[in-house]
Amino acid sequence: MSDQPERWTQATVYPDMWTDPDDDPRDNGAGPEGEAATLHDYLTNYRITVRMKCEGLDAGQLARRSVPPSTMSLLGLLRHLAEVERDWRNWLGEGEPEPRIYGPKDADFLGAVADPAVVDAAWADLEREQAATDAALAAHPDLGERIGISKDGFAIRELLVHRVEEYARHSGHADLLRECVDGRVGQ
């Protein structure tokens, strides 16, 4: 008997998808117009993907470190994404930098324990930090504007692309972590 879960999907239309097209909460419309709208659309859809990969799991499953010796778990990813949202805001250099949410390096993953209160706090932290970073960047609608703590500043475009990249990369991690947890597969 194997301790590996059987692979499965909820989708019935396309067997390699996470869910059926009519049930997919990500925007599948005609697509946004313009560079800023496109970047925000991709970011939104990757954020939704991360959320989808965590849905239906309990605290123990979310905290499971599925690929030893890695400390990565779905819950750790949520905490990490909250931490990097705050860090990106700190790059803007507006005011004093905010301290790390969870403490020293890797505390976001190491503190991802199987406790419903930790899970609830992680979701609240992520939503708060996403909203705060979204608001800070919305104050700078010119994607070419350079601001921040580096010598020449960061272009707003660069920060938006970096956020898309971060969520896309971790969506891929979430795919593998979820499959290890309960066998569910799909885009």
Image (cartoon, rainbow, N blue to C red):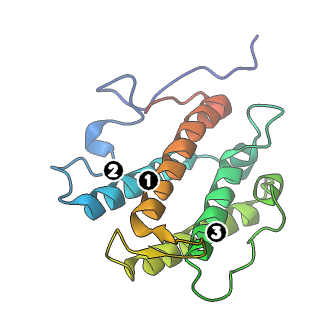
Q: Earlier in the sequence, mark 2 or mark 1?
A: 2
**39 left or right, relative to 62:** left
Position of residue 104 measured from the top left corner of the image (x, y, whole percent): 84, 64
Q: Quadrant of the C terminus?
A: top left
How far apart in space, not on screen, are marks 2 and 3 (Cα)? 26 Å
According to the picture, the residue beneath numbered tag 2 turns out to be 26
According to the picture, the residue beneath numbered tag 3 turns out to be 87
According to the picture, the residue beneath numbered tag 1 turns out to be 48
* Category of crowding for the residue at label 3, using alpha-carbon neighbours closer than 10 angstroms: few (below 14), some (14–19), many (at least 20): some
How far apart in space, not on screen, are marks 3 and 1 (Cα)? 21 Å
Answer with the quarter of the image where residue 102 lies.
bottom right
Number of the label disc, if any, that sits on residue 4: none
Query: What's the amino acid at mark 2?
Result: Arg
Query: What's the amino acid at mark 1?
Result: Ile
Residue drawn at point x = 33 percent, y = 27 percent: 12
* Category of crowding for the residue at label 2, using alpha-carbon neighbours closer than 10 angstroms: few (below 14), some (14–19), many (at least 20): some
Residue drawn at point x = 54 percent, y = 37 percent: 172
Q: Are the residues at dot 2 and dot 1 in contact (C-beta closer than 8 Å)?
A: yes
Q: Earlier in the sequence, mark 3 or mark 1?
A: 1
